[in-house]
Amino acid sequence: MLTPEGERVEHPDYDIDLTPEEIRGLYRDLVLVRRIDLEAVALQRQGELGIWASLLGQEAAQIGSGRALTEADMAFPTYREHGVAWCRGVDPVNLLGLFRGVNHGGWDPAEHNFHLYTIVIGSQNLHAVGYAMGIQRDSAEAATIVYFGDGATSQGDVNESFIWASVFNAPVVFFCQNNQWAISEPLEKQSRIPLYRRASGFGFPGVRVDGNDVFACLAVTRKALADARSGQGPMFIEAFTYRMGAHTTSDDPTRYRVAAELEAWKLKDPIERVRSYMFKNQIADQEFFDAIDAEADELGRDVRKRCLALPDPEPLAIFDHVYAEPHRLMDEERAQFAAYLEGFEG
């Protein structure tokens, strides 16, 4: 719906009517989320975070789909959905606390309708389908959306979630951010066919969308969620995008991909195409863009300051909130760790 040059394109199956204010809001989201991400990478390089999974290049897929959600919908992320977290009102410093190792997640999933980050690849798909089946049995006007990468489509949990969703006609949207690299494994080692076509084998529709086009991601996800809420069952969305940075800050992408590929995708930048569209259509002036850049810089400073001020928890607090009820093995491990720590006293 929006070319890399910032030209608006009509689509026969999907349409979206955005006001100038809404377009300015999407642009603001994209810029601020990228600034948070860049600050987090810098904090990790300076030893303030243990690791970070960058979303650089994937902002449109996350903001577009995130802004398609209603308050009643529930989102299940991996560990890279910082843009969706922003859309759901999660404080970015809570995200940093997880990667700094000072909290177990830092937000209440029920408060934001945004589940905690999932590190185990693909397990959140089963959680999302189970939640969607609960929505179905409650006759609630809501749906779930679950995020995963192209590499996760090779996981058994993901394929099992497709089966359950299809058989029970669950109100769930499978949102695959195909950034083309499962760490160092390219897409051709994951699938012989485009990923969205897998959905037909499980009995529900799939569609590929330009993952760098925030308008298209918003329009397609909004319709998929509406269909799910109305009882039409699951849908698979493949947001075709590109991971501009490393898989995580412990990864070196120069070892497995060529620079020319990266340079080609820089021309498809999701932020620049919206900026170009706004300029061409006089939706915003230079003063607006300068104000957003200034807000982004202030946000970066605020995130850094509050991240560095996060208190270190008591070492034994790692055992808190692991189980809702007393757990014998956990009690034994807590006692063993306490004895280990006492060996350093004095």
Image (spheres, rainbow, N blue to C red):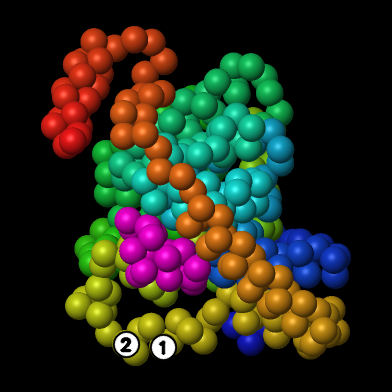
> Which residue carries the number 1 mark?
263
Q: How crowded is mark 2: few (under 14 residues within 10 Å), some or many (20 or more)?
A: few
At a point 56% along the width and 55% down the height, the residue shown is 306
Residue at (41, 15) in percent of width and height: 324
Question: In the displayed structure, would residue 2 be above or below residue 162?
Answer: below
Please say whether residue 196 is visible from this viewpoint. Answer: no
Q: Quadrant of the N terminus?
A: bottom right
Query: 10 Å neighbourhood of mark 1: few (<14), some, or many (≥20)?
Result: few
Q: What's the residue type where badge 1 is placed?
A: Glu
Against 147, residue 127 (above or below) is above
Quarter of the rendering occupied by the C terminus: top left
Distance between the alpha carbons at the discs numbered 1 and 2: 6 Å
Q: Which segment did they paint magenta?
A: 38-57
Q: In this view, does 216 lie above or below 72?
A: below
Residue 323 is left or right of residue 13, and the answer is left
Label 1 sits on a secondary structure element that is helix
Q: Give the labeled residue for mark 2.
A: 259
Q: Is residue 277 left or right of residue 339?
A: right
- Specify whether 129 is left or right of 12: left
Please say whether residue 308 is visible from this viewpoint: yes
Residue 196 at x, y percent in the picture: 44, 55
Give residue 96's position: percent from left, percent from top: 47, 53
Q: Are the two marked residues, 1 and 2, in contact with CB atoms closer than 8 angstroms?
A: yes
